[in-house]
Image (spheres, grey):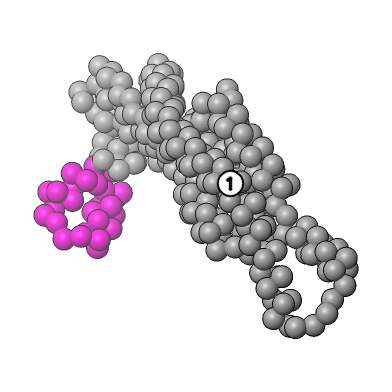
Amino acid sequence: MIQSMTGFGKHVVQLPSKKITVEIKSLNSKNLDINTRIPQIYREKELELRKMIADGLSRGKVDLGLYVEITGEETTSEINQGVVKKYMEQLGSITDGEPIKLLELALRMPDTLRSDKDDIDEREYESIKEAMREALLKINSFRQKEGSVLEADFKLRLKTLGSLLEDIKKIDPERQHTIRERLNRALSELKVEVDSNRFEQELIYYLEKYDITEEKVRLANHLEYFDTTLHSEDSNGKKLGFIAQEIGREINTIGSKANYAPMQQLVVQMKDELEKIKEQMLNVL
């Protein structure tokens, strides 16, 4: 089943004197791009936290927010006034707000508290890792739900493409007949004598240039392959993207060879459906 790269996961852990909140959100990206916002005291653990994300989320632009809020007595910490003032100045330059509101926002930002403790509380850090694991589970669940929506949309558009391909197959004999008549009519208007055998050879050669039998077969195979990949165990957006490119090539070739307005109209509809697939493909993991 495919998964979306868009997701959100949040988990809160309540300790005796602190509330720890972990938020992870992701958007589409070609590779894994991790941005972190964590308190200064936990900077030495950043690589470990990044690895947890890398192990849990293979692709996407990921933002990690780790917030530690004091809810009880914490004699070893005090407000970092310089940092808070700087935050308030920056917030004030962005929007007009009452000082008390700016202060509330500033206190939620990283590094607004400083502690006399130089060492990380290992029990507290274990709680953070547990919150990370829970948040990753939630964001993956979110991604799966979003992926099921994308899958339903892909199936609908694949069905439409298949139906349009069947319409192309139905009108193809009529197209060939029309091209043949068009050439005969053009020749008759020239009012010159031609060798009928030579003309028939040239006509066959000309019609072979506009033959789309191979394109129809390959397009049908690509549509089937896309559907099979869609139902594979792993979500593989890059592979689906490659298949979509091959589908586009066959549609373009049919359009260039069509030389018949009704078929070209069907090709335009196919291109429209494929474009919508490609747009959604950007969100597939």
| Residue 194 pos. (x, y %) | 84, 76
Res. 148 visible in picture? yes
Res 8 quadrant in image: top left
Q: Indicate left or right for 121 with 251 as reference.
A: left
Task: From the viewer's perspective, tell me whether residue 132 is left or right of residue 240.
Answer: left
Q: Amino acid at mark 1?
A: Lys
Can residue 55 be seen in the rendering of this structure? Answer: no
**Magenta segment includes 103:** yes
The residue located at (39%, 28%) in the rendering is 145
Residue at 69 percent across and 43 percent down: it is 218
- Above or below, 196 relative to 66: below
Residue closest to the eye, 131 or 115: 131
Q: Is residue 137 above or below residue 257?
A: above
Dominant secondary structure (helix, strand or loop) of the stretch shown in magenta: helix
Under circle 1, the secondary element is helix
Q: In percent of the image, x 48 and y 42: which residue is there?
A: 160
Please tell me which residue is depicted at 34% across the width and 29% down the height of the picture.
10
Q: Check the image and name the residue furthest to the bottom.
A: 191
Residue 56: x and y in percent read 52, 27
Circle count: 1
On screen, residue 242 above or below 226:
below
Q: Residues within 10 Å of mark 1 (few under 14, many from 20)?
A: few
For the residue pair 87 and 97, the one nearer the viewer reads as 97
Residue tagged 1: 170
Magenta stretch: give its range. 80-107
Q: Position of residue 68 (x, y in %)?
A: 31, 31
**Residue nearest the observer in this picture, 32 or 269:** 269
Residue 175 colored in magenta in the image: no
User: Left of 24 or right of it: where is 58?
Assistant: right
Residue 127 rendering spot, x and y as whole percentages:
38, 19
